[in-house]
Amino acid sequence: MKFKSALLAASVLALSASGAMAANIAVIAGSIEDGFFNLIKKGVDDATLVVEANGGQVNYLRTPNYDNFGPDLVTLINQAVAQGVDGIAIPVWVPEAQVPALQAAADKGIKIMMYNSGSDVKEDVHGINYFGSDEFVAGVAGGEYMAEHGAKKILCHIHTPGAVNHEARCAGVVEGAKKGGAEVNILRTPANLDGDVTGTAESIKSELVADQGIDAVITLAAWSADAAANAVGQIGAQDRVKIGSFDMNPAVLDRIKGGTQTMAIDQQPYLQGFLATSMLAAHIDFGTELATDPVLTGPAIIDASNIDTALQGVAKGAR
């Protein structure tokens, strides 16, 4: 009987110890209206299975929209801290708002993992690693590609003006296009048009009508590529204006397959969500770290040459 009691006590202590070591983390992401983050969430959900298998838990937190972006992100950071998490996986889109909040979280011993955006402030927030694309490098690749495929004057559309990752993308497009002898105009539309395909199409259409020299459009999101396609179609400029986009959705891939969109720049958001979540939990639970820092998940150019492979990933909800 004493042996059984001792065994039971040891089991309880072991469970308590394992519970104490199990990671409780928050993953903070973009707007609930932004379909891109459904792909991030697919990666987070798959990684959550691993975290839960080790006794941990994951809370996925998203901003309601982008109208009050910086303060909303700070609210989510503070919410995670108040919940007593061990770690936070987060992009940094608005450094002036997020960096102080993340520094305060790190000062409390909370581990910070970066993904999607903000690699340049990783050290400032004591980030462990960064999983994502280098936005400027991706932009350079996009600008070079379009110039190499005949574009002479590219319109780069920013749907969230001031967001560091989006501004860096178009800055990269400018640099890449310049290498190929092309020029770039930047169109910044109000943040309240984010996700508004109709309103954004009107803005892009106005630019295309006003400047007949524009022969390519690069958008920074899949939904805004839909808007660009609508704008180009409405003025019958399919033969004049090439379309490229960062990120992709089924419509983008269908257009590439059908020849009405030239390319998309994939940053593989599934991998960003999966790696940021699983590696943060592993670091907390086991003290593991990757030797590669940052871990780049893009850019990968999707065009007619590899569209079928990309479609296979889409069918499984991961691209």
Image: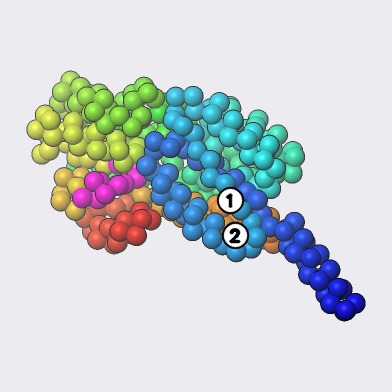
Q: Are marks 2 and 1 in contact (CB under 8 Å)?
A: yes
In the depicted view, which residue is nearer to us: 87 or 304?
A: 87
- Disc 2 to disc 1, how far (Cα)? 8 Å
Mark 2: amino acid: Glu
Above or below residue 116? Residue 14 is: below
Residue 180 painted magenta: no
Tell me which residue sits at (84%, 68%) in the image. 9
Q: Quadrant of the C terminus?
A: bottom left
Q: Residue furthest right?
A: 2
| Magenta-highlighted residues | 245-254
**Mark number, residue 58:** 1
Mark 1: amino acid: Val
Does residue 219 appear in the picture of this structure? yes
**Mark number, residue 88:** none
Q: Would you call the spot at circle 1 few (<14 residues within 10 Å), some (14-19), or many (20 or more)? A: many
Marked residue nearer the N-terminal end (2 or 1): 2
Q: Position of residue 123 (x, y in %)?
A: 64, 41
Tell me which residue sits at (31%, 41%) in the image. 222
**Residue position marked by numbered label 2 in the rendering:** 52
Q: How many marks?
A: 2
In the depicted view, which residue is nearer to us: 295 or 313?
A: 313
Q: Residue furthest front?
A: 1
Q: Quadrant of the N terminus?
A: bottom right
Q: Position of residue 243 (x, y in %)?
A: 22, 40
